[in-house]
Amino acid sequence: MTSKTDKFRAVFLAALMVLSVFAGTVALSGSAAAVDSTGSATVSPSTVEEGSTQTHTFEVTFDNYSTDNSTDTFSASAPANLNVSSVDNVNASAGGTDLNVTSNSDGTWTIEDDGSVNASNATITVSGEVTATAESVSSDVTDSFDFNFTDSAAADGSASANVTVQNAGSGSQAGSPDLLSATHYDTDASSGVQDTVVEVSFNEEIQNASEMTLYVEDEAVGLSDSAFTQTTDGRVLIDTGSDLNTGDVTLNVPDSVTDTEGNPVRASDLDDDNNVSVTVATVSINSDTGVSNPANVYQGENVAVLGNGTNTNVEVEGDDSNYAFSGSTGANSEVFVFNTTNREIDQYNFSIGQGSPNAAIEVRDLGFNMTIDDQNVTTEDSIEGTITANAGNRPIEVSLLDSDGDEVEEIGATLSGQGEYNFEFDLNDVDTGDYTVEARDNNSGVTDSSSTINVAEAGEGQANFENSIITDARGDVVGMNITMSNSDYATVTIGSEDVGFVSNVTVEDGNDDGVVRLYFNTWAAQNGETDDASDVYSVESDDDEITSSSIGTGVESLLDNGEYDLEVRSGQDASVSSQNVATLVLEQRETRSLNTWTAPSGESFSDKEELYEAAQNNNLTQAQDIAFGDRVVQQVNASGLEGVLEAQDSDEVGSQFYGATQFNYSVEQTEAGANREPFQLALNNSNSNVIADSQNDTYYITYNPSQVTAYVDENEDGQFNASEDTVVNDRLDDEEALTGNFTVLEDGLADEEQSVESDYQFSTAEYNMDEPVNVTATSNQTIEGTTTLAPGTELQLRVRSSDDTSPSFLKTSTVYVTENRTFSGTFDFSEQSANDTFTVTVSSNHPEADNLEVDGNVVEGGAEQNQTETGTAGTETETTVTETTTAGGQTTTAATTTAGGETTTAEGGNGGGGETGTGTPGFGIAVAVVALLAAALLAVRRD
């Protein structure tokens, strides 16, 4: 399972920080652990100096963890002399499986076990990072982080790890001064004119401060001795003028910089060259900033909170993020740095030197993004791209990096006022190979990197992938287009040793169109190592060809979800360096839904185009009440079936569908009744059609239940055997309810069984009309009725005069059942007279519906009374008009009913307040069409 661990952005509540205690509630869904009473814990670093802030990594393990469907708690407490400010990057795993971790607003964590931890007596590991500041101590103090794992069954485990806080005089250079912090910021927060300094804070007065050297991007900054001022003992300001340098800023502190007793600055605070990194704060606020007009800060920037003196108290609270912190500018410092890298998008209010907020910032998303025009170029081309952000006029750096991550070329630039910058790297002096481009926003440190860019020698044969990212589900057949120039052959490599799968395939462009569409069957790929992988690969065009294929590093089960490298080069040699790269993303397959539709009894479907055309013409509608004898269409939506069904270029897949052993499809009587076993339908490739729309993970099983054998599965093997099972066709009739079930079995396409169901109920196939039918002796008289037959069914209406009517007449009309299962025909009675009588006959070719005959009368009335009156004389007129409109590629149908002078319009949709069963009933035709086409007509294959 792919780890979905969140990186926590929230820190503990202020009260927790004061107590230096942090805790996580671990809710293991469906699991608990009877762990050993004693676990193992490590914390690094295990030695810190007083006054310093360190990020400690911790890892805690407990043995004999096993699942038992309960809830466990993991907690920890920090040493009393460490003040915790944040906890980040919390991870948990058990039995080799990463567990999903989410952060709660109260400073706790929830860790979910989704059932994939199939382990007994495994080891559970919890790890993370704790940032804490060590308090001052008179001598070295050793205390412990204590960790506890509490089981609901009282099988508790505990572990601890020691951390030592060193006194300033106990380091490698006893009595040496500590360098506490170095910060570059603007001292004038509101004037709009920069007045920048570097504040260097020591724990005591120092001498020879002017001998320190400031570097920006490894270039020394020329500063006079007067630029260095020790405002108070231990606080040194370096005046850098009006430029806030946002690059890599470092400070060199030579041994000549000492305290008043001649002790050099403590070596542990500096690198081997006596350099220390300077924190750059690009935004400054102070107690005059105010809360009503917060300063804008982009996520990732450092904020300098300017105090009114050293050790100024600073309180921080988030408006919506539940973030809270209590601290100070620190000893010999007047600036507190608030880093927004892991802060949520929110307003943060600061109380600087007082109890109520007097400054605020609003953290925004910079939206820093880079796009590359072409990931495959030659040495005669250039690498071009665009950088965009949600803010303009910001300094940036753009670097071209080789495959080892070494910088080849760098561009320093500034985003335009529109927040854009177009860059170009010339490749005349660049070697062939793989490169990436990295862009950096200097103020925030936010970066964005490109995918791999392949630089090939100009003029040679070239092969490329048409798409750089190809996405599909495990078990499906992946389609990828290979483009070629100056060559008829291309060799593709899928995977790498890192993912445990490597396969090569060579294709030939037989029709010289420069493109070969290659299919990779991820289901068939699980056959280990082989020199012939012909069942794994195929091509779309009959003119193209697979010339060779192999699996060098193979698997014996379905390929895992994740990312697989794709490489391609011109020719037939897989050992030649790739000319183009891409990424295949295999997603976890899903069994999503089973829905039921109905179509007229005489409808037959041979491909998906006919299905979708029927839906658009209102001849295929979603329903759970189906007239006995009408056609049933059950729609399976599930990814990862394409490989088993070999459905990449085929519509009809009935033989593969019913022959598959990785899943089952059945239709069974919903309720058998007393003393009876439920019957099943003996569906097979002869009495049903299975139509694939594999590009959209959708498969349709169409059949007429009245034409299928019903049987009781006596040996419960799911297969009809005429010599063993009992045929019960007499039990399959109208008023019966059936349940369709589609189940993907475990240990094939799924780690555990996945099932979806959909019910439908048979009704009697019939027509209904109010009797007598009354019309007036005028034209445009509508005769209407209702039916249980499927929308789209063709009906014949015949109006024949009675024997005592003279002159006699015969009128006929062909009509169709609407989406709300009504029908109507318009007739001309202007040649008839009042009191004429007639018979209306409704008929169709439906195998189960008997003809309906009702009597009718021509009644008194004029031109103003030219609507059909159904029922007895004197009833109010009721007319239904169906309107269909098309907008934006979607069809909307509304039925308007006028009765008693009131008009009601009902648009197609799912009514509220009802109960929904296993299917999706109650949809009008507009919603039905969208439901059918949402995954099919309106979707685009991601490749």
Image: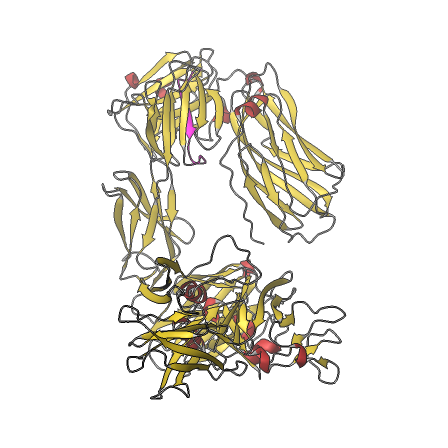
Q: Is residue 856 above or below residue 589?
A: below
- Which residues fall within the magenta stretch? 332-344
Tell me the quadrant of the picture where the N terminus can be found: bottom right
Q: Is residue 490 visible?
A: no
Residue 476: image x %, image y %? 52, 68
Q: Is residue 140 above or below residue 902?
A: above
692 or 870: nearer the viewer = 870
Residue 21: image x %, image y %? 60, 26
Q: Is residue 21 visible?
A: yes
468 displayed left or right of 686: left
Q: Residue at x 71, y 48 (%)?
A: 67
321 displayed left or right of 96: left
Residue 353: image x %, image y %? 41, 15
Q: Is residue 886 above or below residue 141?
A: below
Q: Residue at x 67, y 37 (%)?
A: 73
Q: Is residue 565 above or below residue 490?
A: above
For residue 858: magenta? Answer: no
Which color scheme is applied? secondary structure
Q: Main secondary structure of the magenta part?
A: loop
275 or 556: nearer the viewer = 556
For residue 333: magenta? Answer: yes
831 or 35: nearer the viewer = 831
Tell me the quadrant of the picture where the C terminus can be found: bottom left
Residue 675: image x %, image y %? 77, 70
Picture quadrant where residue 169 is located? top right
